[in-house]
Image (cartoon, rainbow, N blue to C red):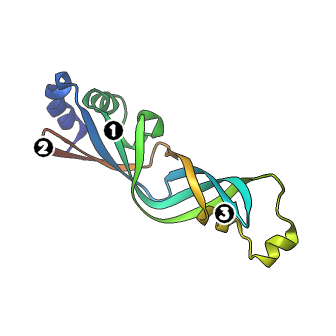
Amino acid sequence: MKKDEVIELLVQFVDQDQSVKAKLILDKNTLKETCYHSGTWNENDFYCVSTTYWSSAEVEVVTSVENIIELLENKDLAEFDHDDFDEMSLGEANDADVTISEIEWLGQEPTDDEKEENDYSDMELYWDSNINDSVLQFDGGGVLSMEFTVNDVTYIIEQE
């Protein structure tokens, strides 16, 4: 559907004040996920940050009908970005490039010998930790399509 057609159909639902779950399909390598980890490696507690660029991804958002209308009136789908939505979660995602940074050891840092003897790698911290928080970000140009349902009717909007 064209965005003008969707706006026209959605206007009738504004007064119902309902939230809408939408799925955004993003272009390749558009979605960046930053996760804040904590864990223990070889009896040494640590914090670290992982940054993941997803090769393909869907982002699930919860928003109001009014917000969808406002976005569609003021932006092309390709101009949507993470700041347009308050509540986002990672949907389906495939293949990723992950980097680990900001490693902070609580207490004494393991020695180089200890790391070598125990096959240390930054990715080991990633796998052996808990994610305490995560942030999803994508910039304009990355949204290929949006799918959402209102009153049992599913709408799909694609980039024009």
**CA neighbours of label 3 inside 10 A, class few (<14), some (14 to 19), many (20+):** many
Q: In percent of the image, x 54 and y 57: which residue is there?
A: 53
* Residue 70 shown left or right of residue 34 in the figure: left
Q: In percent of the image, x 41 and y 42: which residue is there?
A: 88
Residue 150 x %, y %: 17, 38
* The one of 25 and 78 positioned closer to us in this rendering: 25
Front of the two marks 1 and 3: 3
Front of the two marks 3 and 2: 3
Q: Which residue is mark 3?
A: 125
Q: Which residue is mark 1?
A: 62
Q: In percent of the image, x 74 and y 71: which residue is there?
A: 120
Q: Earlier in the sequence, mark 1 or mark 3?
A: 1
Q: Earlier in the sequence, mark 3 or mark 2?
A: 3
Taking 64 as reference, is 56 above or below it?
below
Q: How far apart in space, not on screen, are marks 1 and 2 (Cα)?
A: 16 Å
**Secondary structure state at the residue bearing disc 1:** strand
* The one of 51 and 27 positioned closer to us in this rendering: 51
Taking 66 as reference, is 78 above or below it?
below
* The one of 115 and 149 positioned closer to us in this rendering: 115
Q: Which residue is mark 2?
A: 152
Q: Earlier in the sequence, mark 1 or mark 2?
A: 1
